[in-house]
Structures are given as C-alpha cells and as structure tokens.
Amino acid sequence: MPTILTHPVIPLAITMATGREVISRRLLLAGIIASMLPDLDVLGFRLGIPYATEFGHRGFTHSLFVACLFAVVGASLATYLKATATRTFSFLFVAMASHAVLDACTNGGMGIALLWPFSDVRLFAPFRPIQVSPIGLHHLLSPRGLSVLQSELLWVWLPAFCLGACGFVIRRWLMLYVKSGKSILNTQTDEIS
C-alpha cells in the first residue's frame, strides 16, 4: 500500500483542479477521510484476521462496492457537506476507490479485493511502479520508508499535482475568458444603444 500520507493526494488534486466553488471544505475533509478509510482493515492483524481472507488487509474495505456504499451515505449528508448529492457521491466514490487503485499499483502485498462481494479474487494493476509501504508509521523513518516516500512522490504526488495544476490553470483561463466575453458583450451592447 502507499503510505497513509499519500492517499489524500487524490481528493486534494481534484479539489485543486475544480476549486472550492465545486468542492467545499467539508466535502474535501470527507474525501480525505474516505481516501484513508480502507486501511482501517489493518486492525484485523491485531484481531487475528488472516491477511488473505475477505476481511483481511486489502480485502472488502478496498472494494468498489464499499466505496459505493460510503458514497451513498455521504450523498445523504450532501446538505451538511455543502454540495449537491450527485457531486458528493461522485467525489467520495472517487476518493475512496482511488485508495484501492493506488494499492493495486504497488509492487507488493496480496492484491486488492476490488470486486468484492462479487468476487474474492485479489487483483493487481498491470503496471506496478509504487513501492509497497511497510505497515506501521514507525517504519516510515527507516531507509526503506524513505525509499517508499520517494517512490510515492514520483508516481503519485507529482502526477496528481500536475493534473491538479492543469485543472486549476484551465479553470482560471475559462473564468477570465467568460469575464472578458461578458465585458465585450457589454461594450457591444452599449455601442448599439
């Protein structure tokens, strides 16, 4: 899995691209939580739940089904999250599903139960460039942990920042274009009068 620090990058990049007018602070916070929530399954290690079972690490909590359920619950709270139900559902689904996609792109572990409850097969992405993170925050300060963070910076943070920045620039450009179009339209209307 990528580190717990990396999963929130996806909802942050989406918010950077779309703006606070689209993703409220509350919805962003819910998206950050959704992006990290699947890793609550590591508690199963302490409870004696075997890794390879559907309730083990990277099991049902990493499925698209659970992401959909979480997004439905979130959509029911759309008013509180200061967004429409459709926007809330979409954002939370992508935020939570991105966790599984990133985990599937790592070079270790047992794969992701992406299709649970319809299938308990563990899947990996065909391209797996992200170094798998050691479990436990204390391991992040080791040489291996620093190597994992470098991998995540290259394969997750940098592309997410670039996409978020591109969205930001396009959004700003469109806003300027619309404003200049309105001022041109107002000028032409004044000239006709």
Image: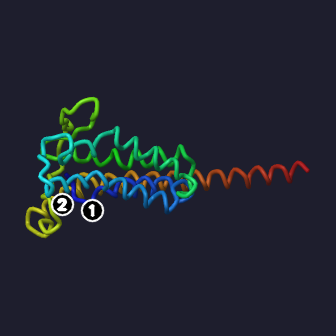
How is the protein colored in the picture? rainbow
Q: Amino acid at mark 2?
A: Gln
Element carrying mark 1: loop
Residue 158 spot, x, y in % from top left:
30, 56
Identified by mark 1, the residue type is: Leu
- The circle drawn on residue 101 is none
148, above or below 96, in the image = below
189 sits to left or right of 101: right
Check residue 5 in the rendering and tell me which mark sits there, or answer none: 1
Q: Is residue 84 visible?
A: yes
- Asked if marks 1 and 2 touch (Cβ < 8 Å), the reply is no
Q: Earlier in the sequence, mark 1 or mark 2?
A: 1
Can you give x and y, in whole percent of width and height, for residue 184 in the image? 74, 52
Q: Residue at x 11, y 46 (%)?
A: 50
Residue tagged 2: 150
**Viewer-proximal residue, 32 or 181?**
32
Residue at 40%, 47% (x, y): give it.
Answer: 70
